[in-house]
Image (cartoon, rainbow, N blue to C red):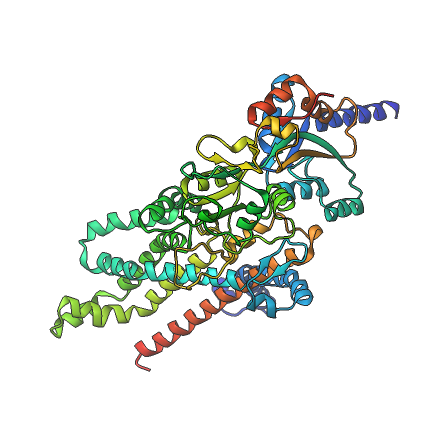
Amino acid sequence: MKTQMMVAGIILGSVCAQAQDKLVLDGSTTVGPIAKAFAEYYMRQNPGVTITVSESGSGNGAKALLNGTCDIANLSRDLKDAERKAMEEKGVKPVTHVVAHDALPIIVHPSNKIKGLTVDQLRDIYAGKITNWKNVDGPDLKIVVISRDTNSGTFETFKELVLKEEKICESAEYVGSNGAIRQRVQATKGAIGYAGLGFVDRSVKALEINGIAPSVKTVLDKTYPISRDLYMFTNGEPKEGSCAVKFLGLIHSEKGREIIEEIGFVPVEKK
Amino acid sequence: MNFAHEQIVLTVATRRRRKVTAWIGSALLFAVTSVAAVAVLAIIFFIARDAMPFFRECGAVSFFTTNAWYPTSDSPQFGALALFTGSFIVTITAVIIAVPPGILAAVCMSDLLPFNVRQLLKPILEMLAAIPSVVYGFFALVVLAPFMQDHLGASSGVNALNASIILAVMALPTIVSVSEDALQASGRELREGSYAIGATRAETLVKVVIPASFSGIFSAVLLGVMRALGETMVVWMASGNAAQIPKPFYNLLLPIRTLTATIAGDMGEADQMTGSAHYSVLFAMGLSLLFFSFLCNLAGEWVVTRQRKYLRGG
């Protein structure tokens, strides 16, 4: 009897250990690259650990945490009240971990001579009140408004920080990822779009907003008006010594901050 | 002797056993056949069940007649008229682009080209159907979109015309292949009969062969319509997804948004937990799509039966 229990205990223990050596992340396409780079680094340091990272959008990440299909949910926005309520009802206790800071640079075609916009002008453009670049001291060219799909955290952030009460105009085009928005903007002369700081390169032109260009410095001192935090959520505080704790510990480590900077986001202040 | 006697006159037990096995056999076949039908009915049932809360909550009138599509707003609006129009515009345009060349190509392949050329051409054409739709979408995005901006004066390269052209190309192999089969099926006798009474090749084609295979060609067109109506990935990538009714309606260089792309794009956020109306409205759109396909099928069925009657001389 005793040996039987011991065997059962050993089996149970090894099952637990196996379960700990697997980490599933799901959610935002903005946080995705950080999670993937972390996972790659972590798996190289700890062979035998399997980490899978899916990028299905912040909304899906929250859903996955609610349904218990992921260990860590990546979100590029905070949880909504409705999501928190649903989690409470299901007994899921979301714990917030700020991964990095990000800004939403406003990008236009590189040939566009316009230098900057104010947040109010930007809101009017997305609300359809300004439809030509010449009304904001730009060339005589129709503005093609491009937005992320309403499923993305990036859209939620943009709505919260720029649109506020305004509704996005009917003629706005929607695309499914940060990369796609950059591709559309660099291929369309009159286009305007927004994407995560890490996705802006020389193929597009980032505008000054209220006279401030998006950069690491302006994000950290919070002068750039359209900036946000990126999050990872776990169900309850992860157990001491578990895979999740070590993984999340990367956020504050030297290497983790280096990775985040390399991808183009702004690491959080050292603890 | 005795053996043969037994086989001719069956005992009551044998007869009963044979009856039962025959009954089981046909019941089994019936069950297998009905799996498909049951699957369709089950899909309709579950979609309708999830769509009902939306109609109860928000009503059907504003859904079908207004075009303010703001599902994630604080006071959400679910006017899907622009989405219905979008689906309608790309489907009709794609069919208009694809049908004439499709039928001409089918006629050419079945009646004009030498046999070995046709044997070569048909598999190549059917390969068009094997290209994954995301690859078509990619093509639309990186080749067609810049072309439209540079040469057609479109302010945005992803628009109704772009999506329609790609959908037309995707529907083409189905239309050509099925029409060609229909033209082939009309038979050699018909053509030889026509030549025998002195008709030229053109007259035979236009006045005999094509009318005789009309029902098959019609089915081909219908399959093309369904392909265009139901396609999701390509329209998500190539149509721009702007929930507006183009002004004027024939301006195909404006971005539009279709029902299928909306379902695919909004499904992630629209869980039961974040607002049931946004979730069930997608099922309401799915139900509408199902309804349209069903109507198309019925229309097709009706045309085919009428045609058969006509050909029989009824």
Q: Determine whether A12 is above or below B286 in the image.
A: above
Q: How many labels does the image show?
A: 0
Q: B49 or B60, which lies in front?
A: B60
Q: Where is residue B277 in the image (x, y as percent from the top left)?
A: 66, 59
Q: Determine whether B19 is above or below A89 in the image.
A: below
Q: Can residue A31 be seen in this view?
A: no
Q: Position of residue B219 (x, y in %)?
A: 37, 65
Q: Where is residue B292 in the image (x, y as percent from the top left)?
A: 49, 66
Could you say which quadrant of the image residue A75 lies in? top right
Q: B134 or A259, which lies in front?
A: A259
Q: Image quadrant for the C terminus of chain B? A: bottom left
Could you say which quadrant of the image residue B54 lies in? bottom right
Q: B83 or B54, which lies in front?
A: B83
Which residue appears at 20% of the width and 50% of the height? B116
Q: A264 or A47, which lies in front?
A: A264
Q: Which residue lies furthest to the right in this view?
A: A2
Could you say which quadrant of the image residue A212 lies in? top right
Q: Residue furthest front?
A: A137
Left or right of B183, for residue B248: right
Left or right of A244, for residue B96: left
Which residue appears at 78% of the width and 45% of the height? A90
Q: Which residue lies furthest to the bottom in this view?
A: B314
